[in-house]
């Protein structure tokens, strides 16, 4: 699973899943996100995972006029919002699920991403879901 989390409203902008963590999965994630991240200089932060350090990944980021930011080595605090999201995902989606096949797990993640963005309320977002928070602010602007 390779998601992009918007720090503004904690919305998952795009994600890709694969049975193997590979460059195709990361490329798919970026291509899904690009139409929504159109501001030149959008910063895309990641940990120092090998998939996010490749020349191919850097070229793709540059192609979409994004700026790459990476966590410092062995410093989980730099990527705390994403670490927090994964903790919530595991707690709310996996721990109660029992044993699942890979296909069942991927389906459950797809369903959870929709729930997380559209229905799951957050105190940090005035008890709104990420999509509802963004919608409310864009309509009032």
Image (cartoon, rainbow, N blue to C red):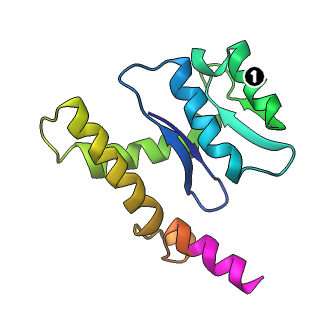
Residue drawn 40% across and 27% down? 18
Q: Nearer the viewer, residue 123 or 131?
A: 131
Q: Secondary structure at mark 1?
A: helix
Q: In the image as oriented, which residue stretches furthest toward the left?
A: 99
User: Where residue 39 sits: x, y (%)?
Assistant: 83, 51
- The N terminus: image quadrant: top left
Number of marks in the rendered image: 1
Q: Is residue 138 magenta?
A: yes
Q: Is residue 49 visible?
A: no
Q: Nearer the viewer, residue 127 or 52?
A: 52
Residue 114, image quadrant: bottom left
User: Where residue 43 sits: x, y (%)?
Assistant: 77, 41
Q: Is residue 57 left or right of residue 38?
A: left
User: Where residue 40 sits: x, y (%)?
Assistant: 87, 46
Q: Nearer the viewer, residue 107 or 41?
A: 107
Residue drawn 54% across and 77% down? 126
Vertical relation: 36 (above or below) 120? above
Q: In the image as oriented, which residue stretches furthest toward the bottom?
A: 140
- The C terminus: image quadrant: bottom right
Q: Nearer the viewer, residue 91 or 65?
A: 65
Residue that mark 1 sits on: 58
Residue drawn 78% across and 51% down? 38
Q: Which residues are magenta?
A: 133-141
Q: Residues within 10 Å of mark 1 (few under 14, many from 20)?
A: some
Q: Main secondary structure of the magenta part?
A: helix
Q: Is residue 136 magenta?
A: yes
Vertical relation: 110 (above or below) 19? below
């Amino acid at each position: 699973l390779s998601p992009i989390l918007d720090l503004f409203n904690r919305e998952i902008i795009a994600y890709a899943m694969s049975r193997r963590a590979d460059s195709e999965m990361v490329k798919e994630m970026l291509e899904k996100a690009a139409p929504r991240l159109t501001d030149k200089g959008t910063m895309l932060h990641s940990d120092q995972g090998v998939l996010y350090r490749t020349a191919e990944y850097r070229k793709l980021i540059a192609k979409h006029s994004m700026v790459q930011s990476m966590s410092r080595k062995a410093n989980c605090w730099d990527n705390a919002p994403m670490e927090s999201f994964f903790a919530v995902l595991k707690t709310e989606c996996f721990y109660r699920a029992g044993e699942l096949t890979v296909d069942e797990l991927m389906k459950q993640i797809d369903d959870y991403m929709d729930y997380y963005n559209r229905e799951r309320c957050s105190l940090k977002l005035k008890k709104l879901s990420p999509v509802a928070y963004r919608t409310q602010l864009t309509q009032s602007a």
